């Protein structure tokens, strides 16, 4: 037996050993609701003529969710006089004009920002029974260095209307994020009733772009059922 044959035999033995040390394992991810549509484009006036404005909307930090990790929001607010904090519902908004400069880097190239004023006082949710809930009147920023989600406090709140395409927004980009180039602003609703089978319609209102009102389409929720699959698990973990 030459060296090549010995090497191949050893590799086959190692592969067989690794396979016998693993077993099939049922994996499952719980059902959840998510936006049916998340990304929008609008033609708006720019400094050098018409340009494209991009708007991304999310309910979760998708970069932090993989495998069987549960899709759930991570915003909890402590109310005065209450022992336990309450969960609240939010929509993440990422707005930027085409080829916009990136203040999170030292690079100076790119197009100058176009002010995009947003007023969360115009936002509301329509529930299944037809009732409505208005958003908090402030726009919120995310300051977590790792994940995409907001906090409710004086440090993160900005009065409406607020420029969600500002350098202040786009300087703050967490390590695990839905967009690695631009930062986020958040609209928050004081409800903890968000469930996998929720059939809400989220009305974010409009963007004010250099005097032009740009209506944001109503956001519908789509149901994602339980997902099951078979993974391979080692018999012994390190």
Image (spheres, rainbow, N blue to C red):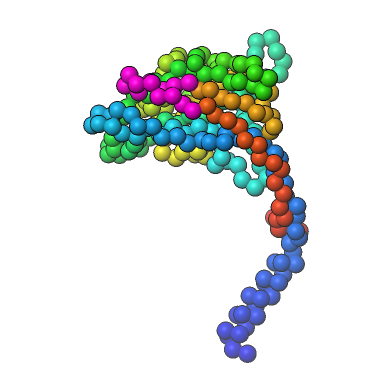
Residue at (37% x, 24% y) in the render: 116
The image quadrant where one finds the C terminus is bottom right
Q: Is residue 6 left or right of residue 184?
A: right
Q: Is residue 129 left or right of residue 209?
A: right
Q: Could you say where residue 125 lies in the image, as x and y percent from the top left?
A: 59, 21
Question: Is residue 121 shown in magenta?
Answer: no
Q: Is residue 142 visible?
A: no
Position of residue 86 relative to residue 113, above or below, is above
Left or right: residue 21 compared with residue 133? right
Magenta range is: 205-217
Numbered label tally: 0
Quadrant holding the N terminus: bottom right
| Residue pictured at 38% horizontal, 27% vertical | 165
Find the residue positioned furthest to the front: 130
Going by the picture, which residue comes out furthest to the bottom? 1
Q: Is residue 107 visible?
A: yes
- Which residue lies at the image location 66% right of the left edge and 76% below the top edge? 12
Magenta stretch contains residue 214: yes
Q: Residue at x 76, y 60 (%)?
A: 23
Q: Which one is in front, 217 or 191? A: 217
- Expressed as whole percent of the image width and height from the top left, the position of residue 178 reads 50, 38
> What is the x, y in percent for residue 198?
67, 29
Between 142 and 164, the one lying in front of the other is: 164
Vertically, is 132 above or below 141? above
**Quadrant of the rendered image containing residue 48:** top left
- Give the residue at the far top of this rendering: 81
Q: Position of residue 132 (x, y in %)?
A: 61, 16
Kindly indicate the quadrant of the structure image that contains residue 51.
Answer: top left
Please identify the dominant SS of the magenta region: strand
What is the quadrant of residue 126 in the picture? top right
């Amino acid at each position: 037996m030459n060296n090549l044959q010995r090497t191949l035999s050893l590799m086959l033995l190692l592969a067989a050993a690794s396979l016998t040390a693993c077993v099939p394992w049922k994996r499952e991810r719980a059902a959840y609701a998510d936006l049916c549509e998340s990304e929008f484009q609008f033609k708006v006036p720019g400094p050098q003529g018409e340009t494209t404005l991009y708007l991304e909307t999310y309910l979760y930090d998708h970069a932090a969710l993989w495998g069987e990790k549960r899709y759930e929001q991570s915003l909890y607010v402590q109310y005065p006089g209450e022992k336990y904090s309450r969960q609240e519902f939010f929509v993440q908004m990422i707005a930027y004009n085409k080829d916009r400069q990136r203040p999170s880097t030292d690079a100076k190239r790119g197009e100058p920002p176009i002010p995009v004023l947003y007023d969360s006082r115009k936002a509301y949710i329509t529930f299944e029974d037809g009732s409505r809930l208005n958003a908090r009147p402030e726009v919120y920023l995310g300051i977590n260095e790792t994940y995409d989600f907001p906090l409710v406090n004086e440090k993160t709140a900005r009065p409406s209307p607020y420029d969600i395409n500002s350098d202040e927004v786009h300087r703050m980009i967490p390590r695990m994020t839905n967009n690695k180039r631009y930062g986020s602003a958040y609209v928050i609703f004081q409800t903890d009733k968000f469930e996998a089978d929720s059939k809400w319609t989220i009305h974010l209102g409009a963007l004010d772009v250099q005097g032009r009102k740009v209506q944001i389409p109503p956001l519908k929720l789509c149901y994602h059922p339980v997902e099951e699959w078979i993974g391979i698990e080692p018999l012994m973990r390190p």
